[in-house]
Amino acid sequence: MDAINTRADCAVADGPGDVVSIQEIVLRNRHSLESIEETRGNTATHPPNYFINGQQRQSTANSANLNYPPTLRLRSLQPDQPRTLPNGASTSCSAAVKSVACRIKYLSKISLLKRNPSGVIDGADPYSNIRDACAGRKVKRSSYTCSQGKAPGGTTCLDLKVLQYIYYLGTTSRYRVQVNAIAGACHSRRSKHYAGKAVDLQLFGSKATRRAQEKAFRAACSKRGGWSHGGTHVHCQIV
Ligand SMILES: [Zn+2]
């Protein structure tokens, strides 16, 4: 399985910073952050790295934000926090994702588990993922450990292609469609699930029926440019 570093997408891009001189480190121990900035002069475009309790921190903010306590400022730059406009509208995910998620939500042919296959209930189950995506929001990932690794927590947008795949199965397949996991549950460390780009689908019936269902679901995944595996369920990822 090829991998994705889900955190890489979320990394905060730090701007270039000047390295603070030794003299300034000494000054830093004597004066407040604000007074240091005054001695440095214009820092509006390239705020410096700075030290707190001997640890170097790299500033990512403009000079106005330097008035905030560093911990507060870093907290405000945490990835995966849904950005909310003053009127409460979310700017997180695309309108196309929202649209297909709503179609899946209201398509009775598709069953969406309301808990993770592990039994954990954490709001990252397929039903919650689709409900949140239909509302235009990022969806929750789980944050528990399993034999394969540890789910990272936080949130992600669901990917349009994997949603279109689920909807396609729900509208065309002769087999029952039950979604076991999308962004939630615990998987291998770099699983595409955590980026909202994979889905797990339940297999039903006799051994022969399950085999036929697996074949059909995997073929549909391949047809859409995805990669899949079978077994106890069908996993399809489309990147
Ligand atoms: Zn999977």
Image (spheres, helix red, strand yellow):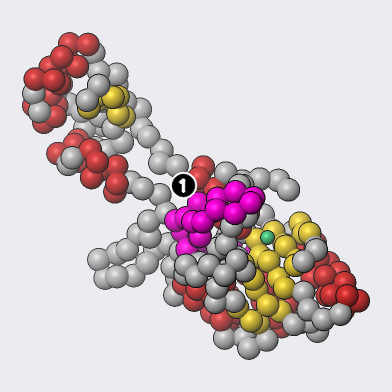
Q: Relative to 149, say whether 222 is above or below.
A: below
Task: From the viewer's perspective, tell me whether residue 29 is left or right of residue 148.
Answer: left
- Quarter of the image that includes the C terminus: bottom right
Task: Using the rendered view, name the quadrant where residue 43 is placed.
Answer: top left
Q: Residue at x 45, y 42 (%)?
A: 11
Task: From the viewer's perspective, tell me whether residue 32 is left or right of residue 69.
Answer: left
Report whether the residue tagged 1 is closer than 8 Å to ligand 1: no
Query: Of residues 101 and 192, which is closer to you in this image?
Result: 192
The magenta segment is: 140-162
- In the displayed orientation, state which residue is furthest to the bottom: 108
Task: Using the rendered view, name the quadrant where residue 64 is placed.
Answer: top left
Q: Position of residue 47 (x, y in %)?
A: 25, 29
Image quadrant of ligand 1? Answer: bottom right
Quickly name the residue at label 1.
Answer: 10
How crowded pointer 1 is (Cα within 10 Å; few <14, some 14-19, many 20+) is rated as few
- In the displayed orientation, state which residue is furthest to the right: 208
Is 32 a magenta residue? no
Q: Note whether residue 147 is visible.
A: yes
Q: Which amino acid lies under the numbered mark 1 shown in the image of this protein?
A: Cys
Q: Note whether residue 195 is visible.
A: no
Task: From the viewer's perspective, tell me whether residue 93 is left or right of residue 234.
Answer: left
Q: Residue at x 10, y 28 (%)?
A: 32
Q: Secondary structure at mark 1?
A: helix
Is 146 a magenta residue? yes
Q: Position of residue 14 (x, y in %)?
A: 37, 34
Q: Residue at x 31, y 29 (%)?
A: 58
Q: Residue at x 82, y 70 (%)?
A: 214
Task: From the viewer's perspective, tell me whether residue 147 is left or right of residue 30.
Answer: right
